[in-house]
Image: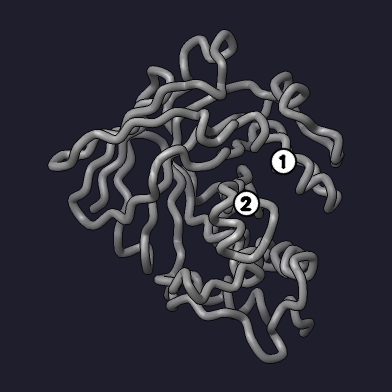
Amino acid sequence: MTKFDRIAEKLAGTWDQRPDYEALSGDLALSSIAEAYQAQVVVQQAYAKTRGPIAGRKIALAAKAMQEFCGIDHPVGGAIFAGDVHQTPAEIKRSDFNHLGLEFELALELGQDVAPSTNHSAASVAALISAARPAYELIEDRSADYAQLDVRTMIADNAWCGGVVLGPEIAGWRDMNLAALPARLTRPGHEDMEGSTAATDPLTSLAWVLNDVGSRGITVKKGEVVITGSMLTTQFPEIGDAYRFELGGAVVEMTVI
């Protein structure tokens, strides 16, 4: 059994139990970001056995402040598995997570296979999109202490993606500026939160994701969705919490049960 196989056994093999976060150490410690991505591929293969095939991609640590906090100068990426894709209105079980985080994103669906390349730009990727939808990302951070975060372990563990909830296609999105879509989050008992996709620059995020996986020889398939970064502050829901996220006129809803 290789080192990466043992990492996959430790991370993916305990997914159902959702143990607390623990940085990979000893003979499982990862020496570099490149090695972390090598481990991620094997971990994703192991996850796919129980969570379904890869159905999309994510970007994490897109904000410069979070990159500096983690000691890197670039975002990181991960995958979304078919078994973790929910449609609005969704009921999400709190018991399915160790520590559930919720982020508020624009999901971009690809209308064609995208062969490995590192030449994508915000201008070029627009032609690859077949749909734009509001979405929640479900984060599983395993109750990590962010002050003690090892970004290489986070990368190996698929950048903590626990799934997504997808909303309907935004009507008329092709005629909209995807970097200026207004967003509103409504929660009973809380003041509304407002923002926009200007906080995430979604086409730049999509280009980064495609260049990132392209640099590792990965083809992104038609129909995959790419979530492009959270435009509002991460929330940590508990049982009974209900969320209504409106983006560009389309609404995605979920309740935690």
Q: Which mark is drawn over residue 188? A: none
| Residue 25, quarter of picture | bottom right
Distance from disc 2 to disc 1, alpha carbons, whole Å, reads 14 Å
Q: Which residue is mark 1?
A: 208
Number of labels in the image equals 2
Write the residue at 86% across / 35% down: 119
| Residue 249, quarter of picture | top left
Q: Give above or below for 104 relative to 128.
A: below
Q: Look at label 1 and name its amino acid.
A: Trp
Residue 21 in the figure: left or right of residue 3: left
Q: Give above or below for 203 relative to 140.
A: above
Tell me whether the residue at label 2 lies in contact with that at label 1, contact meaning CB atoms closer than 8 angstroms.
no
Q: Give above or below for 201 relative to 249.
A: below
Q: Which residue is mark 2?
A: 79
Q: Secondary structure at mark 2?
A: strand
Q: Crowding near pointer 2: few (<14 within 10 Å), some, many (20+)?
A: many
Q: Nearer the viewer, mark 2 or mark 1?
A: 1
Quick one: quadrant of the N terminus? bottom right
Please provide percent x and percent y for residue 161.
Answer: 52, 55
| Residue 185, quarter of picture | top left
Please provide percent x and percent y for residue 211.
Answer: 79, 42
Please provide percent x and percent y for residue 85.
Answer: 48, 44
- Upstream in sequence: badge 2 or badge 1: 2
